[in-house]
Image (tube, grey):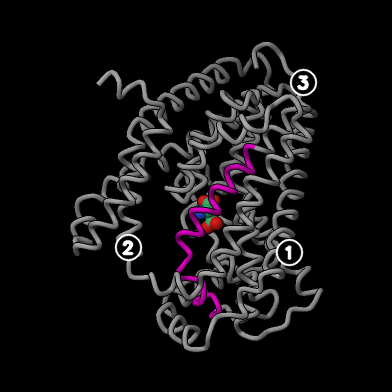
Amino acid sequence: MRKLKSIPLYVKILAGMFLGIIFGLVASKIGCNQQVEDWIAPFGDIFMNMLRCVAIPLVFFSLIGGVTAVGNVSSLSQIGIRAIVLYVLTTVCAVGIGLAIVYTIHPGSVVDQSTIESMKQIYSSAVDKAVDSSSQNSSSGPLQPLVDIFPQNFFGAMGSNSNMLQIIVLAIFVGIATIMAGEKARAFSDFISSANEMTIKVIDIIMMFAPVGVFALMAQMIVENSGSADVLAALGLYMITVLLGLAILIWGFYPLLVKLFVRNFPVREFIRKMLPVQILAFTTSSSSATLPLNMEVTCRDLKVSRKTTSFVLPVGMTINMNGTSLYQAIGAVFIAEVLGFDLSFSQLLIIVLTTTISAIGTPGIPGGSIVILVMVLTSVGLPPEGLALIMGVDRPLDMARTIANVTGDATVAMMVDKHVPHTDED
Ligand code: ASP
């Protein structure tokens, strides 16, 4: 028992992941899919529910704490602007990498007509759903998304994880007000910092169950997708293209940024320390569920100050999604190629623009970008029904792009932190 305790958490999570895969494969081979759904999957759901449940308090308390720790509004806006500029630049680079790879490999040129037809049939209802929710989103004026990030009710904003942008806006306002109130807000500041500590402890407790949760999530994923082996084979080259792009981003682009801009931190350490966060991102497919661990690792292992971590990561988790943007760019070009559309240079620019902006609106949850991809496709005149082509392999790619999303957030936090003046308390 003692020995088990001394094994590092990420090794246990990794073990949970592999055992879950093996268990899922065996279960689907012997036809026990339903049993896995009934008796194993709920443990994955419990783990995800708990992680989601702490997301709002974590973002809210740590962001207020982060804002007040910065101490004055002008350095706050400097950190904020620096982070947002870096988010946008890294996203544009990610989209550029995606486009370069998809135009080198041309995965759309090898899919045959019968595959196209069968996928359109299989996934038509899922596509209809995505198109429906996308048209709901875009039915109002062009500035509606901006209006939507300003909540009209405090408890309304706090009531749903999908309101993350509203929660960020609220927390920033409250944080700024706390700075402005100075001594009079002392009790409130103390409350926030102790609430922060409590939230982190709750997360520690939840993470003790991570190996079991991850085991259940993987087993469930395997049995649910065991029927899609044919789809995987048909779309093999497309998947390789996306995975290659993500690999370049995760193990090439980010380490390069760390090497160039965070000189005093060894790149190997960066890659090693990010591993547990990446495993959790991969297994949960959700950057918001990964946020607690990402914050802990970024602060403790990547040596980013608490004030930068608590400000930059929650915001990054919501608006910075490099992996998702790369994937959307490749997906859009792939669909265009398969359906025989020739994209012009200006359409490519629109793809760069829409994928960059839409990352902001993509929720950090499994499959969060599917609805957003409808908008990207429509913006360049591609039929959203083309989505059916890539729906069947979305889950594994979602898992992989979530790794890139969370690694990008940590990288930007390291880069921003280089320029933040530090005190001993940090
Ligand atoms: N699952 C991704 C995330 O949580 C979002 C997406 O690309 O669908 O970061």
Residue 78: % across, % down: 79, 33
Residue 42: % across, % down: 26, 49
Residue 95: % across, % down: 71, 59
Q: Kindly report the distance in space between the C-alpha atoms of the residues bearing marks 3 and 1.
A: 38 Å
Q: Nearer the viewer, residue 423 or 188?
A: 423
Are the residues flagged by discs 3 and 2 in contact, CB closer than 8 Å?
A: no
Quadrant containing the C terminus is top right
Nearer the viewer's eye, disc 3 or disc 1? 1
For residue 398, side relative to residue 143 (left or right) = left
Q: Secondary structure at mark 3?
A: loop
Residue placed at 37% from the left, 44% from the top? Answer: 17
Residue placed at 27% from the left, 45% from the top? Answer: 43
Q: Which residue carries the number 1 mark?
A: 100
Amino acid beneath label 3: Pro
Which of the 4 image quarters holds residue 74?
top right
Confirm or reject: label 2 Cβ below 8 Å from ligand 1. no
Q: Read off the magenta span.
A: 385-410
Residue 169 in sight here: no
Q: Which residue carries the number 2 mark?
A: 224
Q: Does the magenta segment cover residue 397?
A: yes
Q: Kindly report the distance in space between the C-alpha atoms of the residues bearing marks 2 and 1.
A: 33 Å
Q: Residues within 10 Å of mark 1 (few under 14, many from 20)?
A: few
Q: Nearer the viewer, residue 368 or 198?
A: 368
Nearer the viewer's eye, disc 2 or disc 1? 1
Disc sitting over residue 421 in the figure: 3
Which of the 4 image quarters holds residue 330?
bottom right
Amino acid beneath label 2: Glu
Residue placed at 55% from the left, 79% from the top? Answer: 386
Magenta highlight: main SS: helix
- First in residue order: circle 3 vs circle 2: 2
Residue 380 in sight here: yes
Residue placed at 76% from the left, 71% from the top? Answer: 348
